[in-house]
Image (cartoon, rainbow, N blue to C red):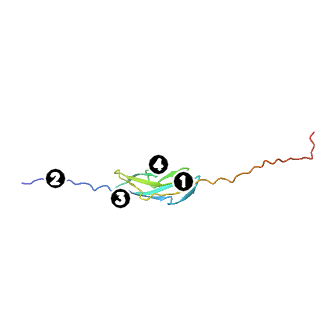
């Protein structure tokens, strides 16, 4: 007689994607007004990337679903920024960049002050008015 044996074959576990910000350079400096493009490379060894989300601190700047992955921060505020990217794959696994990029934006320099004089000037004319 023979006996049947049940075998369960499990698929390999999903490997999370990898992601790295490629621009701007860490420590880059900008002067207002400025639009900053944040770009990232993302790969998934066992599937596909469905999206890359870009953040400044905890604020979502936007997402991109097609490579090359990028968003633009329009009219970046003066001060320090901390950009990160989160890649998500087709099995819903996600990875956040291991290193954030920290550029700074300087306020636009003020124009030189304009001085006005309160001194009165008298104009004289040799012409007579009739």
Name the spot of residue 83 as percent of width and height, x first. Answer: 47, 54
Residue reaching furthest to the left: 1
Callout 2: SS: loop
> Would you say the residues marked 3 and 2 are in contact, meaning their CB atoms lie under 8 Å apart?
no
Name the spot of residue 72 as percent of width and height, x first. Answer: 51, 51
Give the labeled residue for mark 3.
Answer: 45
Give the labeled residue for mark 1.
Answer: 79
Identify the residue at image location x=81%, y=48%.
Answer: 119
Identify the residue at image location x=53%, y=59%.
Answer: 28
- Dot 4 or dot 1: first in sequence order is 4
> Would you say the residues marked 2 and 4 are in contact, meaning their CB atoms lie under 8 Å apart?
no
Q: Residues within 10 Å of mark 2 (few under 14, many from 20)?
A: few
Name the spot of residue 44 as percent of width and height, x first. Answer: 37, 57
Which quadrant, please, contains the C terminus?
top right
- Dot 2 or dot 4: first in sequence order is 2
| Of the pair 31 and 64, the residue shown nearer to us | 31
């Amino acid at each position: 007689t023979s006996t049947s044996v049940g075998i369960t074959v499990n698929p390999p576990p999903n490997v999370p994607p990898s992601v790295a910000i490629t621009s701007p350079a860490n420590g880059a400096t900008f002067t207002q007004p400025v639009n900053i493009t944040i770009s990232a490379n993302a790969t998934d060894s066992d599937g596909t990337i469905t999206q890359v989300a870009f953040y400044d601190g905890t604020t979502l700047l936007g997402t991109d679903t097609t490579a090359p992955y990028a968003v633009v921060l329009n009219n970046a505020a003066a001060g320090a920024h901390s950009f990160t990217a989160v890649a998500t794959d087709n099995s819903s696994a996600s990875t956040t960049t291991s290193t954030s990029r920290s550029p700074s934006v300087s306020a636009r320099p003020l124009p030189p002050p304009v001085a006005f004089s309160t001194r009165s000037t008298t104009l004289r004319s040799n012409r007579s008015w009739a």
